[in-house]
Amino acid sequence: MEPQAECMLVILGATPEGKKELVGFQTVVRESAQSRCELLIDIKARGLAVPPEIAVGDGAMGF
C-alpha cells in the first residue's frame, strides 16, 4: 500500500492452437480505467486488427 507503488497491466492473447502470446504491457502508477484505455489504444496503434473478445481482471483495487 505504498503511495507511489507501480502496477503492471498485461494483455495476453491466445492463438487458435491455445498458445499464449504477449500482446502488450504497461507499467503505471495506479490502475485505472484511463490506464487500461491507454494500453488498448497503444496496441491498436501498433496494429492489433481484431478487438479483444474477453477481459479478465485480478480483482485488485482500481479495476
Image (cartoon, grey):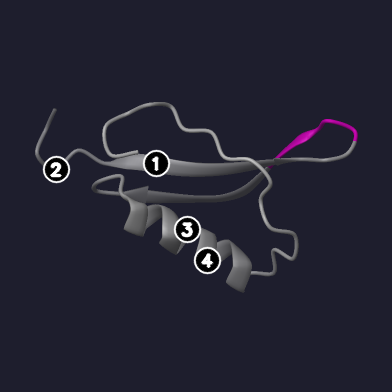
Q: Position of residue 24 (x, y in %)?
A: 57, 52
Marks 1 and 3, Cα distance to the nearest angstrom?
11 Å
Disc sitting over residue 4 in the figure: 2
Asked if residue 43 is positioned above or below residue 22 in the image, the reply reads below
**Circle 3 residue:** 39
* Secondary element at image label 4: helix
**Circle 1 residue:** 8
Quarter of the image with the N terminus in it: top left
**Residue span colored magenta:** 17-21
* Secondary element at image label 3: helix
Residues marked 4 and 3 touching at CB (< 8 Å): yes
Q: Position of residue 37 (x, y in %)?
A: 43, 60
Q: Main secondary structure of the magenta part?
A: loop
Closer to the chain start, of discs 2 and 4, is 2
Q: Position of residue 61 (x, y in %)?
A: 26, 32
**Circle 4 residue:** 42
Give the residue drawn at x 57%, y 40%. 55
Marks 3 and 2, Cα distance to the nearest angstrom?
20 Å
